[in-house]
Image (cartoon, grey):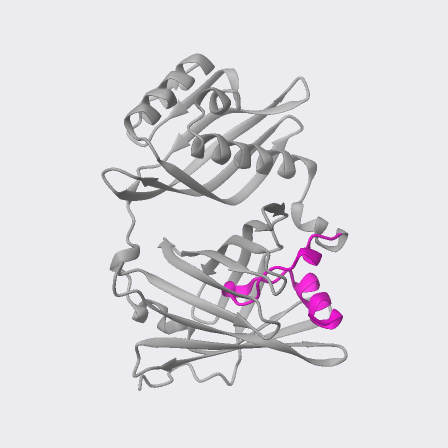
Amino acid sequence: MEARHLQAIVKLGFCLLGLLVCHPIVATAQDAPATGSEVEQAVSESARQFVTAFNQADAKAIAALWTEDGEYIDEAGTRTVGRAAIEKQYADFFANNQGAKIEIAINAIQQVSPDSAIEDGHSQLTIASPAAVASGRYMAIHVKQNGQWLMASVRDSPSRPSSSANLSLQDLAWLVGDWTALGDGSEVELDYDWMGNGSFIRGETKITDEKGPIAGGSQIIGKDPVTGHLVSWFFNADGSHGYGEWSKQGAHWMIRTQGVTAEGLPTSSINILYDADDNVHSWQSINRTVGGEPLPRTKEIVIERKSDSKTNKETK
């Protein structure tokens, strides 16, 4: 991949809509501001450790993330108090739900005092047997004790079955049109239109920096006839490519991607697309990895519909 292309990706922090696969060079000092303050880094690390421990069914490691007298309130409103009780609750859950996995997407981290912060986010739980997926929201209050940030209180909002299988390609009809996003000296243009007699949406991306155009990539979005879920495939000019699964939680679209760089390194991320209105959206990529190594989350980027964009391109 040419240096200009890499520099543009670094400046914009892009894996936009799953179109640009992150390259290892993205993990540079230029990306560091995306990690936010030390408090945000500490809370994000706690969330990462929770996901790792949960997916390894390690109840003890999960409980260690709470304060000694911390509380957990589940989606039914049941309150569990104390690290030992929380460990037992998770141990019982894992005993009855072998193979359960969780994913977390943090929406916001707000420091409310020098020693406290609030984390707000979405979670998606996958149960292996019987197969089921549930999503919901959570709020966690973190406090700093003896130099360590721990969870003092976590509350889950009622989970609901994932509606991913009920989504249709028409739910993404708003995407059809021309969009633009600006970064530090770089601009990304996205052009989406219907294809395959309305069975797919195709997107083309162009990147331009101060020296002129840079090769971009292509994306195709459709519905998997086997699973019924919305999925996407993306292909970049440098040879990198990947696959994404789309789900929706309120006004947030979540795109779980897996791919490979042109050098053959595996990549993964969760891309969050916020549907502000018909003409303005925001995008951010979290939980990013390249070659199994974690990368910092990107900055939130505003995507705007061009004023002359054709918002009602006809389905063929």
Relative to 147, does residue 168 appear above or below in the rendering?
A: below
Residue in the image at 37% along x and 83% along y: 312
The quarter holding residue 316 reads bottom left
Q: Nearer the viewer, residue 62 or 67?
A: 62
- The residue lying furthest to the left in this view is 130
Q: Position of residue 187 (x, y in %)?
A: 65, 73
At x 66%, y 46%, the residue is 35
| In the foreground, 247 or 115 | 247
Query: In the picture provided, is 158 more to the left or to the right than 33?
Result: left
Query: Which residue occupies the extreme front position in the image?
Result: 264
Q: Is residue 230 above or below residue 298?
A: below
Q: Is residue 271 left or right of residue 171?
A: right
Query: In which quarter of the view is residue 298 placed?
Result: bottom right
State the image coordinates of residue 227 (x, y, percent, origin top left).
27, 58
| Front-lying residue, 23 or 305 | 23
Q: Can you say whether 63 is above or below 36 in the image?
A: above
Residue 223 at x, y = what percent? 31, 67
Q: Which residues are magenta?
A: 1-28
